[in-house]
Amino acid sequence: MNDTHRYSESHLTRETFRTELNGLVYDWSYQFLTHEQLRDYAQYKLPEDFATKRDALLAGEYLNISESREVAHTLSRGKYSVVREGEKSKFVQMVRKLRSGKWRGATGKPITDIVNIGVGGSDLGPLMASFALREFATDIHDHHVDTHFVSSMDGGQLYAVLPICDPETTLFIISSKSFGTIDTFANVDTAREWMLEHFEPLNLGVNDWLEHHIIGVSANAKKMDAYGIPAPHQLLFPETIGGRFSLWSAIGLSIATTCGVQVFQQMLEGARLMDEHFATAPVDENIPMLMALIGVYNREERDINNLAILPYDGRFRMLPSYLQQLDMESNGKQYNAANEAIDYPTGPIVWGGFGPNGQHAFFQHLHQGYDQFTADFVLVLHRTDKRFSKRVQTSLAEQQRLSVANCLAHRRLMAFGSKSDVPSENYPGGHPTSLLALRELTPESFGAIIAAYEHKIFTQGVIWGLNSFDQPGVEKGKQVALDTFKALHGEDISFDPSTDAIIKMV
Ligand SMILES: O=P(O)(O)OC[C@H]1O[C@H](O)[C@H](O)[C@@H](O)[C@@H]1O
């Protein structure tokens, strides 16, 4: 494809490469494709049954073949939403009880700290959304609850969280679709020891812990029963919702305990509107499809193997980690949906970091390093926050403008470069990037941007013939780690000289 006319600033004045949905602006001006090329590329790349597959996804009917189940996460922001029954919903009642201080611990004190224990999809989505949306909480009563997140198997986060919590006023949400992930239960075991150590001198025990200080969120009711979680404290969600797509479901409980039910509902609504847009907008105005086709083009025609996610608003700090799982676990595959080996590139390596800080760190490589990359800049154009006086708000608004200016400037430098005969002053440019700009961050626009990425990844999976909804590579990782763990416990298992030697040192 001929792109000699792109990356010339004059060309950009003749065509608009921008589409908007409810305050989410997607600008692809600094990508290689023109509208015409994009439409041709869509015809060439999208399989004939793409619309059928898309409709099946949005109806909750798309088949995850290898796991023999449907894919239903889009329904969790529509007709099967956990908040659809309002005050009658168990999810809503739990959130209200916790956020109003009516949920009491075993000694009768109101819960003040909630710890979500989960990993992967049971951690990254809730953590990201809670962090991004906490300032929008509207239904705060007199009571203040803090929500913490613990995921890592090494206990590293418990070291930080336990000392600032009081066992009598702390509640743990065990978030695990399978209710069997070893990382999560390693953390739960330690949390239980911490609590029981405090409870036993008070003549309280495991049952008091289970009765007052635990909520289970899972697709596996049997395992929650077996663990002893009382039925009223169990939240179930369907098997058909994949872990990395589960923040919209009951797994989002910690989002709602942090931000309130209303914000959670608004987030779902933003995602639902993106579902509608994905279903109906023409291809060169369809945000997820544009993102997908541009990504496939960069991967296949330009041989660019990585995508940097560069948010310029601190509330999106966790977005790169979230999208890493969403994309790499879905499309990082060398086999197709029919389980045949494939010989073409699929999903890119997704990485990134908070843009303003990255400028003082890894941007050197982006501006002058050897490697090719593509990037998504994520920007929020306006921010107001009534918690501050006018005077402080004015200063904060100036900071927001500073961040916007830096984002736009670095994006230009990556696209157009800055030529000089002095090698150290030469910036090659030519890196294709997109801009996702929110006019304002709201729960709705947040929901929309996350759903856009989900559909982008789905579309790419369809183009590449993948099943984007399984993750055997992760399952394999769990098995190999089990054997190593046994060896650490003294079982006579040998691996290789390096591993064996380190095991002996532990
Ligand atoms: O929610 P859980 O069943 O505990 O699973 C947590 C995570 O486990 C695995 O690593 C899967 O690959 C992830 O997709 C999942 O999100």
Image (spheres, rainbow, N blue to C red):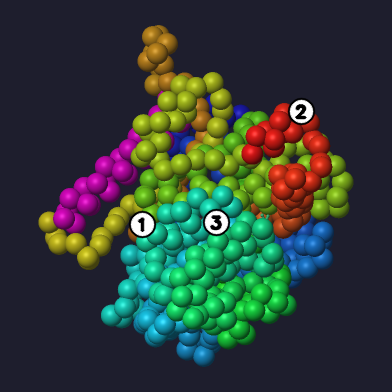
In front of the other: 349 or 42: 349
223 is within the stretch colored magenta: no
Question: What amino acid type is highlighted by mark number 3?
Answer: Ser
Three-letter amino acid code of the residue under disc 2: Pro
The residue at 38%/33% (across/down) is 359
Q: Is the distance from the Cβ of mark 1 to the nearest ligand 1 atom less than 8 Å?
A: no
Which is in the foreground here, disc 3 or disc 1? Answer: 3
Label 1 environment density (alpha carbons within 10 Å; few <14, some 14–19, many ≥20): some
Is residue 204 visible to the viewer in this orientation of the structure? yes
Quadrant (top left/top right/bottom left/bottom right) for the N terminus: top right
Q: Horizontal and vertical percent for residue 73?
A: 64, 68
Label 2 near ligand 1 (CB < 8 Å): no
- Which secondary structure dominates the residues rendered in magenta? helix
- Mark 3 crowdedness (10 Å alpha carbons): few <14, some 14-19, many ≥20: many
| Label 3 vs label 2, nearer the camera | 2
Provide the residue span drawn in magenta.
392-417
Tell me which residue sits at (55%, 68%) in the image. 192
Quadrant of residue 444 in the image?
bottom left
Between residues 21 and 186, which one lies in front from this camera angle? 186
Query: How far is disc 3 from disc 1 in space, using C-alphas?
Result: 33 Å
Q: How far apart are marks 3 and 2 (CA)?
A: 31 Å
Question: What residue did someone put label 2 on?
Answer: 497
